[in-house]
Amino acid sequence: MEKLTIKSWALDDRPREKLLSKGKTSLSDAELIAILIGSGNRQESAVALSKRILQSADGNINELAKLSVEKLTLFKGIGEAKAIAIITALELGKRRQLEIALEKPKITSSKDVFNLMQPVIGDLEHEEFWVMFLNNSNKVLAKAQVSKGGLTATVVDIRLLFKRALELTSVGVIVCHNHPSGKLQPSNADQQLTRKIKEAGNTLDIKLLDHLIITEKAYFSFADEGVL
């Protein structure tokens, strides 16, 4: 009896084809590992073998990453090369997560927001409106320009703002825009927009944490001033 290779499976059971047709997020952990090892053994497919390997680590990728080459090669069908492939892939994933964590600054005050955004919009000659999306640890998941306008005003689509927040599963947002004139006092339009964003966030359970007006050398924080 020959090994059950990926080529011998039904089309729907082939993780490589599934990745190409449905995208990488459609694959289970076992299917991703199956692509790494390529084939199983005489009794089980690569996916079945991968499931068994995962089960030995309580289905936990972090626990699987702790297994040595020696422990992985105890599984029938896993030689040294396949064990090394699994360890290498998990180590790359671990390093990627570390880099992502390092790239996510934590916001502890309005000054942190100013330090991040002043280089982006502080000295522009036109007005731009930006939003920062935060997780429950107040770390920045992403930041994005919502609108770009003239010297006096911008048009902000609040629906698009919160669409992105929902996509990122953000629990809080901080918005900011620049005043090319250098004036820090919020306009009536600024205050109305802030209220609209706050109300929309309340409905979606996504908190508006602050709104900053940023100039080249200073900023105004709605939260610090108690007008949020």
Image (spheres, helix red, strand yellow):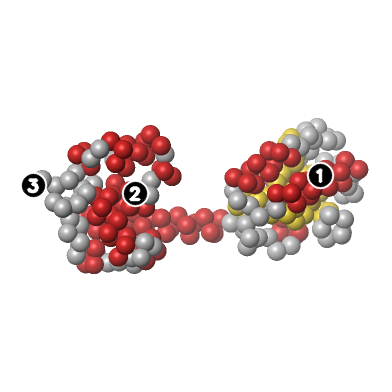
User: In front of the other: label 3 or label 1?
Assistant: 3
Q: Amino acid at mark 2?
A: Leu
Tell which circle, 3 or 1, labels the residue nearer the N-terminal end. Answer: 3
Percent across and percent down for residue 132 are 68, 50
Tell which circle, 2 or 1, labels the residue nearer the N-terminal end. Answer: 2
Look at 70% across and 49% down and name the residue there: 204
Label 3 crowd (10 A; few <14 / some 14-19 / many >=20): few
**Image quadrant in which you'd find residue 163:** top right
Percent across and percent down for residue 90 are 36, 57
Look at 24% across and 55% down and name the residue there: 49
Q: Amino acid at mark 1?
A: Lys
Tell which circle, 2 or 3, labels the residue nearer the N-terminal end. Answer: 3
Look at 81% across and 44% down and name the residue there: 196
Percent across and percent down for residue 135 are 62, 57
Q: CA distance from mark 2 to mark 1?
A: 44 Å
- SS class, disc 1: helix
Q: Which residue is mark 2?
A: 32
Q: Which residue is mark 3?
A: 1
Residue 85 horizontal side relative to residue 135, left or right = left
Q: Is residue 196 above or below residue 223?
A: above
Q: Amino acid at mark 3?
A: Met
Residue 196: mark in rendering: 1
- SS class, disc 3: loop
**Quick check: marks 2 and 3 in contact, CB under 8 Å?**
no
